[in-house]
Amino acid sequence: MAKNDLQGTLDLLVLKTLAQVRELHGYGIVLHIQRASDELLSVEEGSLYPALHRMEQSDWITSAWALTDTGRKAKFYKLTPAGRRQLAAAEKSFDQLVKGIRAVLRYA
Amino acid sequence: MSLTRRIANLFSRSRVQDDIDAELRSHIDMRTSDNIAKGMSPEAARRDALLRFGNPTAINERTTGADTALTLASIAGDIRFAARQLARSPGFAWTSILTLALGIGACTAIFSAIKPILIDPLPYPQARQLMMLREMGPSGGPRAVNFATFHGLSERTRSFSSLAVMRAWQPAMTSADRPERLEGQRVSADYFRTLGIAPILGRDFTADDDRFQGPNNVILSGTLWRRHFSADPAIVGRQVRLNDTLFTVIGVMPPTFQNMLASSAELWAPLQYNPALPIDGREWGHHLRMIGRLRPGVQNKQAIGELHTILQAFGQQNAAGYNGTGGVPSGMVVDPLQKALTSGVRPALLAILGAVVFVMLIACVNVANLLLARGAQRRAEFALRAALGAARSRVVRQLLTETILLATIGAALGIAVAAAALRALIALSPPGLPQVHAMIIDPAALVFALAVAAIVGIVLGLVPAFQLSREDLNTGMRRASRATAGTRQWARRALVVSEISLAAVLLVGTGLLLRSMQHLFAVDPGFDPTHVLTMQVQTSGRRFDTDAARVRFFADALDRVRQLPGVVSAGFTTQLPLSGDGDVYGMELQGETAVQQTPALRYAVTAGYIETMHIPLVRGRLLNNHDIAGAPPAVLIDQSLADLKFPRQDPIGHLVRVGPDAGNTARPWATVVGVLGDVKQTSLSIGGEQAFYISTAQWVWTDAAQTLVVRTQGEPAALAATVREAIWSVDKDQPIVQVATMDSLVAASEVQRHFVLMLFEAFALAGLLLAAIGIYGVLAGSVNERTREIGVRAALGASRRSILTLIVRQGMTPVALGLLIGLTTAVLASQAIAAFLFNTSRFDFLTYAGVTALLLTVSAAACLLPARRATTINPVDALRAE
């Protein structure tokens, strides 16, 4: 899959993760995606951060420094109402995409 | 992120970057400690964490890039980097900057000159509502308005909130020892109200001022008030003596008032024409200019329609008055005032703008060529940066920053160039160019220069960027050290093609103008301008109120002048060819209806005028001392009028009535006694103007201002002072103005065309030089790159001659293609200067052939230099150079 399409998918994964866990730092998001996908998806860890900052610029998420369970300082991200709307739209279009691809695969 | 924080980020880039660094570090730390928890050694745990994460520096840069505010800050970094890059190759940098500075400077100067004339609104409130109105004659051509038309329209129109007419007025102020002649205007009562400007002192004219034989009131300009009356605040009510008559000052205009209709006018008096419109009065003379202010919401078309309706009824009621002056108008021509005032210079300015854009384009092509060569040298650098993790978009951004920086420095210098060029332009500009004082480098010009710089920077930046995108960066490093000839050749040829074609268009334009000028000055003006001195003599003051007094003064003055040593002959005329005069009256041929009457130029002349001017007599006789008041009136007509009215017959002996007499059955007929050759009155380029000549003594009135022409034995200008003193010896109070030789008037009549030509010559020369440098640069560059190839060819036995042929052929092929494109474009583009061409076809063969020859010669020379160097390359050195 081309890079640009993957970026949209990454946004969707991040937004969904934050919708489920409410508040999480970048490393936590990586772990969550890996766990939730039964180790099928692994995010290239570095490329997560430009995506997070871009989404923050778009006002989909907000961030704040806080302490982790282990007492380490980390930047935590949280969904905004705009982010929730974006998630709904992205989920819908992803469903369409999957349906479409399924239909094509089944056709043979 | 809030806006304030984003802006704050701009000033604390390091803090934000630290923040991102901390975030990335905390990620790597968390991964490392998880790895240790899984049982890895600390070193292995950290390596794994870094491996999974990727290059932290690159990630940080990409993350900051995601932050809009930080993009701005990183641009500052880019600019610093670009400046260092440019400083490293000063030769390239300065050549590009100076080329761009010249291009941008020339463009900005022309823009600054054009802006106040064509772009800025006139300096009046709601200037869009202001219109210039002219009468449309029965045959359709526009002509000046007469008072009757103004009177008829202003009483009836509903589309205009006000109308005003004006004429020039040059009163002599006789308070000083020598009479000082002032420039002024006679205006109708609503003149200033129509423009929307009120006096700062005193009051405006009212209908009571502007009535027939009304009071002598005058309004002064701010400058005259300061110059002559030391800005006396109590000036209103004081009296000044103008033309021997006392005028009361009733107001002073603000110093900021710009009179676009007569920029040198310094005082105004009411017109005071007779609204009873006496049939033989000046009220019917077409010598007024009319302006009007449209009511809000009224369209031009509606107004024209309304005026047409009014004129049809009004013209019928007043047919008798119109018939003596060229017939009832068929309608009015209504143009926006700004357009009407600039229509004379607009085509010239637009053509000049076009020419300077071509120079700018050639300058850009030259810089593009330099960038291309530099891009080739820097391929290894880009490849290295890509290998170190720079995204391609990041490299392109860096390249754009560099070219925009070049263009911006170019623009900064260009503004200095523009300021100097603008001064030169103003110094050389033809008189009559409007708004010269407003031609300054203002903020709009700065914005213009920077906008041009931005566009140029982006377009030029795309050249190396495009070059970059055409090849794989990773192979760039490997290939960088090898001299390859093929890939860039197409781009360079394209540059040569565009350079040659741009220069060809410029040169063809210049060539056509040069040929026009050559043709124009070969035109016979219809008289002999050499050894002729001219000056306008005016009668002013109460003692000249009667025609008889004026006749006596002009006759005495003529006698004195004729007796001067060095004077061959002399005469007076009411209008002088090529001096800007244009006095048109009607002529009625016996048996003709009013509609058929022909408007023609009127020359009321004394005996001696035609002889002095050497105007050839085609048939019949000249006017002489027997054509005096009371004698049977005699009229001369010119060849054009004879051809029009008396085709294939002898006009001599036919009966006509001219001027106010036309159509007036109470007046006697005049006889056509001779036919003269055509004289160029308006311009050398306008022929076939109909004209008639009549003795001053037989014209209905005696003009108060007449032009003296003197044929001299020696240099005419040397006699000017003597002639003036001779006239003053008759009456020392009479103003004498517009002293000039006829030769200089002929030259001045074409001054605008000459100005356009001069600018075109300058631009064409600049374009040709730039193009020659460009072609040389391209070929020299390509020969340098092919040193090795040429060495191999030489080593394999290619003769000197064949190498020379190869280089020249490869150089000249794009030149030929460029010429083809350029000449084709020129055929189309020459439309833009068609208005300035005279007796010269847009497709003038000689011009096109000359440009082809010139460009081929220059290109061949530019080719030959590097080609000769190529043949001297020692094959051994060339191969060892690798």
Image (cartoon, grey):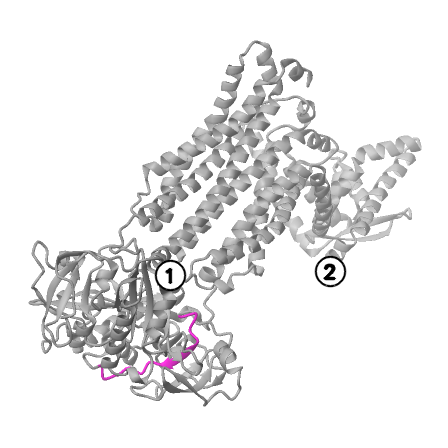
Query: Which-is-in-front pick, marks 1 and 2?
Result: 1
For the N terminus of chain B, the image quarter is bottom right
- Chain containing mark 1: B
Q: Position of residue B197 (x, y in %)?
A: 45, 77
Q: Is residue B398 magenta?
A: no
Query: Residue lying farthest bottom?
Result: B237
Q: Quadrant of residue B601?
A: bottom left
Foreground of the two, A7 or A54 = A54
Q: Position of residue B730 (x, y in %)?
A: 31, 77
Looking at the picture, does residue B5 appear above or below residue B95?
A: below
Left or right of B244? Residue B24 is right
Query: What residue sits 50% from the left and 26% below the top?
Result: B811
Badge 2 local density, few (<14 within 10 Å), some, or many (20+)?
few
Q: Label 2 lies in what chain?
A: B
Query: Badge 1: how crowded within 10 Å, few (<14), some, or many (20+)?
Result: some
Query: Is B276 included in the stretch rendered in magenta?
Result: yes
Of marks 1 and 2, which one's residue comes earlier in the chain? 2
Q: Main secondary structure of the magenta part?
A: loop
What residue is shown with label 2?
Answer: B4
Q: What residue type is disc 2 on?
A: Thr
The magenta segment: B262-277
Q: Looking at the image, which residue sits at the far front?
A: B565
